[in-house]
Every structure is written in structure tokens, then in C-alpha cells.
Image (cartoon, grey):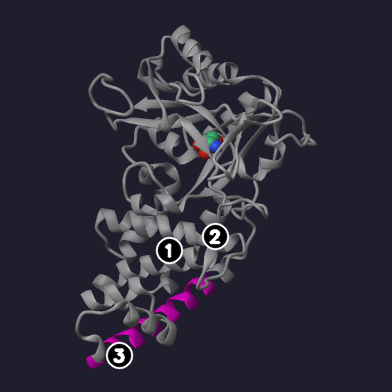
Amino acid sequence: MNTDLVIRTFIEYFEERGHRRISGSTLLPPPGDPVLFTTSGMHPLTPYLEGRPHPLGRRLVNVQRCLRTTDLEEVGDATHLTVFQMLGTWSLGDYEGPLSLDWGYGLLTEGLGVDPGLLHATVFGGDERLGPDTASLRLWQERGVPVELTVEDNWWSNGPVGPCGPDSEIFLWTGDTPPRSTPTRDDRWVEVWNHVMMRHRRLEDGSVVPLPQRNVDTGLGVERLASLLQGRSSVFECDVFDPWRRLLPPLWPLDEPSLRLVCDHLRSAVVVIGDGVRPAATGRGYVLRRLVRRVLTVLWRDDRSRSLGDLPQELVVHTLDHFRQHGDPGAVHRLLLEEERRFGRLLERGRQVLARPRFRGPLTDEDFHHLHDTHGLPRDLVMSLREE
Ligand code: SER
């Protein structure tokens, strides 16, 4: 089952249950949203979760591209990608959590063929403000799915303020042995689908008040589920990486962790550029700059002659297509190359500056400020140049 089929099966299943498909939006969240990039399918829907009527009704389904910079350090492990697609469903003040979980169970087991014996759920166990989510607990007990109760792990929020609520997460067993232990104690339980009972809003003062309507917001990472359904041991082995694995190693022989990082970051850079971001010293542009620089740092570690100019155009086209973007692949390529040249010049200048006697010994905060403000050398770059 490839990713396209997972997406189609998911969308059709929810359309049959009265959901209307909304088109996924850009990675840039609407003004006022506290995050830099869309990290989940609900971002573009925040006003509707807060009570504004949606033109397509109360049941929605979509596939949304997401970027999570919090996962940047985890890139290379079996389950995290910087940019990925999230399938989402919403009940905007319509049905409640247990029905959503029941449909989730039905789709996974009947629609996608997951063995019910490989599932585990987690449910909000209650804290000093709110009681446990007994409705979700009951549903899982009725379906015979084991449940673990947690507190922080089963509370979802978009940021420090805004819509939030208790959630119930569905995990899939990925071990070679029969399932054992629980999701918080054994990381062979991999989270695949989160159902958030989004009916609260956190205010500036930290208090939590009810939203005008009781919503359900669910999200499922496509590449992660597809790789599990395909029996692959990591997201980097699911079908979307096939062209990357075919074309990159002959061009740039890399060890597996470096190959994963290069594929992940280049793919992310293409998508971010596709949504109109340009490299910059701050904000979104800086995230893009860091992605490209990390790729180049890895590529140049072994061979300074490697260049993004050699990146096969097919990979740029494939990525834009996968994320349903309509940008010009040639323009994306040129931008990557321009950024590479800028980074190359910066490294050269950095080496010259750091060779001066003033910067040979231990560096003070004042030195770092001077290097940044006068020579455009960020602290992380200075540190890595000094390690060379
Ligand atoms: N917003 C929730 C999440 O990102 C469910 O979509 O996990």
C-alpha cells in the first residue's frame, strides 16, 4: 500500500461518513497563529474550531503538509521527518470523541488491514483541573484495545495559548516479538493517529476555559503509517523515498544517517521554497537557511566539490508533486544553488577571520557578538569552523 493509496483510502472513508474534503494549505500559518510553520492540519482551521461556521459544514477531512522544527534534532531516526503530510479529520461541534475513535479503529483494521492485536491506545487520565477521559477509555475497552492512561502526553495544544484538549493516541506495535509493555515504556509502540477532544482554550494567564463548541481534531502522519503498512523499519524506506534512494547514493556516497539527513532536509527545503519562503537571517527564512547549510555541511565533510547544482531535477519535481505544489522546479534549483554559493563564501570569510590572533583562544560573548554583527558569522557556524 503506497502513500497515495493510504491518502485515497483515508479520504474516501471519511467522505462516506459525511466529511467534506478541504484543500490543504500552505506551510505558512494564517496571521496571528503563534507558530512559524504549520505543524498540524488544524492550524488553518483555528477560527472554525473557535466557533466560526465553516462554509463546507461541520465534518471535514484533508491532507495538509506540515513542518516541525522541534523534530529537527530527531531527523535520521526511524519515525521523524521535518516535512511530512498529515491526514486530518474534524468534527466542528458535531460528533464526539468516541465516534471518532471508533471510525479510526475501523479504518485502521478493516480499511487498511492492520491486525487489531497490534494496537494500543493512550487516554488522558485527568489532572487537578479536569477529570479522566472516561468516554474514550470506555470505547477502547469495548473494542478490546489495551489502554494506558497518561497526563501530559495526552494533552494537546497548539502553543502556549489557543485551542487545546485531552487526546487519545493510537499506537502500532513494530517489534519482532508479540506486543508487550505500553507506549510510554517501550518505543516499539509507534504513535500513528492522534484524536484530540478539542473543547478548551488556554488563555494568557494559563487558565483553561471551554471553547464555544465541542470539536474533535485528528491527525495521522502519512509517511509514518505508510512505512509501517509497507513493513519498512523506517520512514526513509517508504515509497516516497524510492527515487531519493535510487538517485542520491551514486551521486554522493554517504553513510545511512547522513543520507537520511540529506534526503530529509533537501526535501524540506524544496517544499519550503515551494511555499514562497526565501533564505533569510531570521524567522522562516532562517529555518530554510539552516536546512540547506546542514545538508552542505554533511556533503562537504567528505568532498568539497559536491554541489547542489548536481541534485537531479527529478527529485525536485517528485517532491513538488508529492506535496501538490506548482512551483517552477528550475527556480527552486537556482535558489538552492545561490544559497550554496553564499554559504561557501561565508565559510571562506569565516576561516580567514577566525585565523586572526584575536580569535585563536577561548571566545567571549563579546567576541561572538562581534563575529556575528561585524562579519555575519553566527555562533553555531563559528563553533563548527573552530572544530575543523
Ligand atoms: N492536532 C493534533 C496533532 O497534531 C491532531 O491533529 O497531533
Identify whether 306 is placed above or below 202: below
Q: Which image quarter holds the C terminus?
A: bottom left
Element under label 1? helix
* Residue, disc 3: 352
Q: CA distance from mark 3 to mark 1?
A: 24 Å
Is there any visible trace of residue 15 in the rendered image? Answer: yes
Q: Amino acid at mark 2?
A: Val
Mark 3 or mark 1: which comes first in sequence?
1
How many numbered discs?
Answer: 3
Identify whether 117 is placed above or below 130: above
Q: Position of residue 205 (x, y in %)?
A: 57, 43
Q: Quadrant of residue 331?
A: bottom right
Q: Residues within 10 Å of mark 1 (few under 14, many from 20)?
A: many
The stretch of residues the image draws in magenta is: 333-357
Q: CA distance from mark 2 to mark 1?
A: 10 Å
Look at the numbered discs 3 and 2 and tell me whether their residues touch, using CB distance below 8 Å. no
Q: Position of residue 358 (x, y in %)?
A: 25, 90
